[in-house]
C-alpha cells in the first residue's frame, strides 16, 4: 500500500473517531454500572431493538463463556428489552431514539462506548442473535483464548458468521424465552461460500450460505457479508468502519493466512432463522433503518412469501466446534 493510501486511511480513522465523539450526544444512560468494570474484564458490546425474548439466553451464554460486563445500546425498544436489561447487575445500558441508519447502523455508538470504556480490554461486539464459538470453547473459558492471544501478540480475532436454520418451515417450532435457539436451528451450510480480498482494508469478504442461495439466488453478490472481526484488544485509537466486518488501523483486518498456513479463527453461530424472523423482517423493512434502503429485508419479505425451507440435502447438523474445524470453517491454528 502506498504512502497516499495509508495517509487516507489514517484520515478516515480520525473521521470515524470524531464522528463517534459527536454521536455520543445521542445516547442516554439508563443503567450505569461501568464503575464495576475491572482492568482485566472481558466486555461485550451490542446494539439492539425489541429482542426481549432472546436476551435471557444471550446473557447466559456469554456469562458462561466468562464475559464480565455487557455494554448495550437499546434503540427504542417497545417490548420490555430496556426494562429487562436495566435490571441486570452486569449490564450498563444506554438508550437512543435517534436513527440507527444515521449512526452507521450502530457503529458510531459502539465506537464511542469502546473508546470510553473498552481501552485495553478484550472487547467482543455481537448482536443478540450471534453466539461466539472458538477453539476449545467447550472446555476453556474465553479468558483462555484472550490470554493466548495476548501471549502471541495478536490483537484481533475473526469469526465467520454461520447462518443456522431448522429443518422445515421457519415458523414450525415456536422459540421460547430462555431456550437455546440451536435446539431449533440445528443446521448450517458446510460449503457454498465465496471469498474475496478487499484490497483497501486488507480483509477477506465472505458471502454465501442459505441466505445467498434462498433470498439472493438471482444476485448472490448482494448477499449479506459473513466476515466478522468481533473480538479485539481495544485501543482508543481503533474504530470499526462497517459493522464488525472491518476496522482501522488496517493491520487489524489481516486475520487469515492467505498463503497456505492457518491462523486461529472462530465462528459466530447466527440464530436469525427462528419463528420470530418473519415479524422481525417486516418491522425492519418498514423502519427502513438498514443498509441500502433495507434491501436485505425486502429480499427476506419477498422470499418468505414462498414459505421457504432453508434445509437442503447438503445441510449439516451442528455438533461442535471440532466439526467446524474439520469442515474448514474455523481453525485452532497453533493454539494447542
Image (cartoon, rainbow, N blue to C red):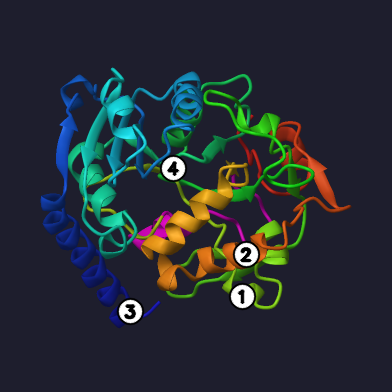
State which tag comes first along the sequence, 2 or 1.
Answer: 2
Which range of residues does the magenta coloring cover?
A: 244-265
State which tag comes first along the sequence, 2 or 4.
Answer: 4
Q: Which mark is residue 5?
A: 3
Badge 3 marks a residue whose secondary structure is: helix
**Label 4 to label 3, Cα distance in Å?**
30 Å
Q: Is residue 232 left or right of residue 108?
A: right
Q: Which residue is mark 1?
A: 221
Badge 2 marks a residue whose secondary structure is: strand
Badge 4 marks a residue whose secondary structure is: loop
Residue 215, image x, y percentages: 66, 66
Q: Residue at x 54, y 57 (%)?
A: 227
Q: Which residue is mark 2?
A: 207
Residue 105, image x, y percentages: 34, 59
Task: Please tell me whether mark 1 or mark 3 is closer to you in this view.
Answer: 1
Q: Label 3 neighbourhood size at 10 Å, few (<14), some (14-19), many (20+)?
A: few
**Label 2 to label 1, Cα distance in Å?**
8 Å
State which tag comes first along the sequence, 1 or 3.
Answer: 3
Badge 1 marks a residue whose secondary structure is: helix
Say whether residue 236 is magenta: no
Q: Which residue is mark 4?
A: 126
Mark 2 and 1 residues: CB-CB less than 8 Å, in contact? yes
The quarter of the image holding the N terminus is bottom left
**Label 2 to label 4, Cα distance in Å?**
18 Å
Amino acid at each position: 500500500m502506498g504512502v497516499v493510501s495509508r495517509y487516507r486511511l489514517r484520515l478516515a480513522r480520525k473521521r470515524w473517531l470524531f464522528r463517534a465523539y459527536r454521536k455520543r450526544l445521542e445516547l442516554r444512560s439508563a443503567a450505569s454500572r461501568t464503575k464495576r468494570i475491572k482492568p482485566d474484564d472481558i466486555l461485550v458490546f451490542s446494539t439492539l431493538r425489541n429482542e426481549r425474548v432472546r436476551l435471557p439466553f444471550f446473557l447466559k451464554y456469554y456469562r458462561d463463556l466468562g464475559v464480565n460486563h455487557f455494554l448495550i445500546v437499546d434503540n427504542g425498544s417497545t417490548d420490555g428489552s430496556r426494562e429487562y436489561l436495566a435490571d441486570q447487575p452486569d449490564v450498563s445500558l444506554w438508550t437512543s431514539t435517534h436513527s440507527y441508519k444515521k449512526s452507521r447502523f450502530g457503529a458510531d455508538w459502539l465506537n464511542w462506548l469502546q473508546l470510553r470504556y473498552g481501552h485495553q480490554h478484550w472487547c467482543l461486539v455481537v448482536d443478540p442473535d450471534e453466539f461466539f464459538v472458538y477453539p476449545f470453547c467447550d472446555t476453556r473459558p474465553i479468558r483462555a483464548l484472550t490470554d493466548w492471544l495476548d501471549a502471541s501478540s495478536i490483537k484481533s480475532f475473526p469469526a465467520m458468521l454461520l447462518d443456522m436454520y431448522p429443518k422445515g418451515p421457519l415458523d414450525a417450532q415456536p422459540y421460547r424465552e430462555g431456550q437455546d435457539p440451536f435446539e431449533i436451528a440445528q443446521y448450517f451450510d458446510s460449503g457454498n461460500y465465496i471469498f474475496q480480498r478487499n484490497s483497501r482494508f486488507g480483509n477477506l469478504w465472505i458471502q454465501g450460505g442459505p441466505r445467498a442461495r434462498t433470498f439472493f439466488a438471482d444476485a448472490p453478490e448482494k448477499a449479506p457479508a459473513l466476515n466478522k472481526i468481533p473480538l479485539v484488544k481495544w485501543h482508543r485509537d481503533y474504530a470499526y468502519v462497517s459493522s464488525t466486518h472491518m476496522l482501522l488501523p488496517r493491520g487489524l483486518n489481516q486475520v487469515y493466512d492467505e498463503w497456505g498456513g492457518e491462523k486461529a479463527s472462530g465462528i459466530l453461530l447466527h440464530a436469525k432463522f427462528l419463528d420470530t424472523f418473519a415479524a422481525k423482517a417486516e418491522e425492519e423493512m418498514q423502519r427502513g433503518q438498514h443498509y441500502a434502503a433495507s434491501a436485505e429485508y425486502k429480499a427476506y419479505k419477498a422470499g418468505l412469501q414462498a414459505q421457504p425451507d432453508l434445509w437442503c440435502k447438503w445441510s449439516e447438523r451442528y455438533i461442535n466446534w471440532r466439526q467446524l474445524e474439520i469442515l474448514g470453517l474455523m481453525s485452532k491454528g497453533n493454539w494447542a
